[in-house]
């Protein structure tokens, strides 16, 4: 789903950014249109996390300008209208919390000065759990759930604030094929309802190839467009700093290192 006559949800212009005087991203120009669904791909250290941190408001660019949902880029304050889903591997599972409590955390922005959730908040959480098929797990500890169920909980937490933009960091990492398919199907459904989605992924074959838009990054934006436009040997080789071949066979995409094909 896309909208062509509205302002971009994300607009980055000539952005440089990094940490401790080390530049990670250089001259980044990127626009995400309302209703778009974009995958961000690139090798480790390419700047994917840095780009997400910029968009989430956790990092300030060293130069350039940009906005997210109309709010200028800056650190320490996340722009309004963003839902974030972290990698499952980055979550501290030692913290005892139920599914219902985890999703309620996504209502913190709307609680304002209330010391506890009211009936409206509890109703909103119940509706979100029902929407994502989690109602039966509401009182269960989140550590007791499967990887796919945990991912749905974090999606519910992100969606409870009705975001315009949903940012996900490797949402299909560490899950089985069935769960991966379910997560992607749910994201496509949310996108069809008008939510703009940006997600990182390391899976070029089964995940990135199934997304409407792709951004290839390696310290800079190497290419952006549909999978058919960006998944070429030239672009992927530039993105991953290695000679790569892209093979299209019966509707499937396969990216391999050239020496894998030659056996050398």
Image (cartoon, rainbow, N blue to C red):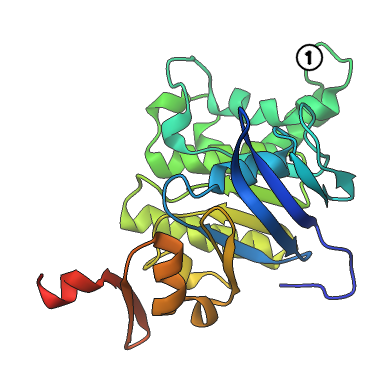
Say which residue appears at 39% left-offset and 53% top-offset.
179
Please give left or right for residue 170 compared with residue 108 in the image.
left
Q: Which residue is mark 1?
A: 116
Q: Is residue 159 visible?
A: no
Quarter of the rendering containing residue 138: top right
Q: Quadrant of the N terminus?
A: bottom right
Q: Is residue 179 above or below residue 86?
A: below
Q: Position of residue 80 (x, y in %)?
A: 83, 40
264 and 155: which is toward the camera = 264
Quarter of the rendering containing residue 101: top right
At label 1, counting other C-alpha atoms closer than 10 Å, the crowd grade (few under 14, some 14-19, many 20 or more) is few
Say which residue appears at 82% left-offset and 62% top-offset.
8
Q: Is residue 141 above or below residue 12?
A: above
Q: Quadrant of the C terminus?
A: bottom left
Quarter of the rendering containing residue 27: bottom right
226 and 100: which is toward the camera = 226
| Secondary element at tag 1 | loop
Please give left or right for residue 174 compared with residue 227 in the image.
left
Say which residue appears at 53% left-offset and 69% top-offset.
211
Question: Can you name the residue that lies furthest to the bottom here?
Answer: 250
Say which residue appears at 35% left-offset and 47% top-offset.
175
127 and 195: which is toward the camera = 195
Question: Can you name the residue that lies furthest to the top here?
Answer: 115
């Amino acid at each position: 789903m896309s909208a062509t006559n509205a302002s971009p949800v994300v607009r980055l212009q000539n952005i440089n950014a990094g940490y401790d005087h080390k530049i990670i991203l250089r001259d980044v120009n990127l626009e995400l249109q309302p209703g778009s669904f974009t995958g961000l791909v690139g090798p480790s250290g390419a700047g994917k996390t840095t780009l997400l941190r910029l968009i989430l408001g956790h990092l300030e660019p060293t130069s350039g300008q940009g906005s997210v949902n109309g709010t200028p880029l800056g650190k320490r304050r996340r722009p309004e209208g963003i839902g974030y889903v972290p990698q499952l591997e980055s979550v501290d599972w030692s913290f005892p919390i139920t599914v219902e409590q985890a999703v309620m955390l996504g209502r913190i922005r709307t609680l304002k000065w209330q010391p506890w959730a009211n009936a409206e908040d509890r109703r909103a959480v119940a509706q979100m759990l029902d929407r994502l098929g989690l109602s039966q797990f509401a009182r269960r500890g989140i550590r007791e759930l499967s990887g796919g169920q945990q991912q749905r909980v974090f999606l519910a937490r992100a969606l409870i604030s009705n975001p315009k933009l949903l940012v996900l960091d490797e949402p299909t990492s560490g899950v089985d094929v069935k769960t991966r398919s379910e997560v992607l199907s749910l994201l496509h459904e949310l996108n069809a309802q008008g939510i703009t989605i940006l997600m990182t992924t390391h899976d070029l074959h089964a995940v990135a190839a199934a997304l409407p838009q792709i951004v290839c990054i390696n310290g800079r934006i190497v290419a952006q467009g549909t999978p058919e436009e960006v998944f070429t040997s030239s672009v992927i080789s530039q993105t991953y700093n290695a000679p790569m071949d892209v093979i299209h066979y019966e509707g499937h995409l396969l990216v391999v290192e050239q020496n894998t094909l030659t056996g050398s």
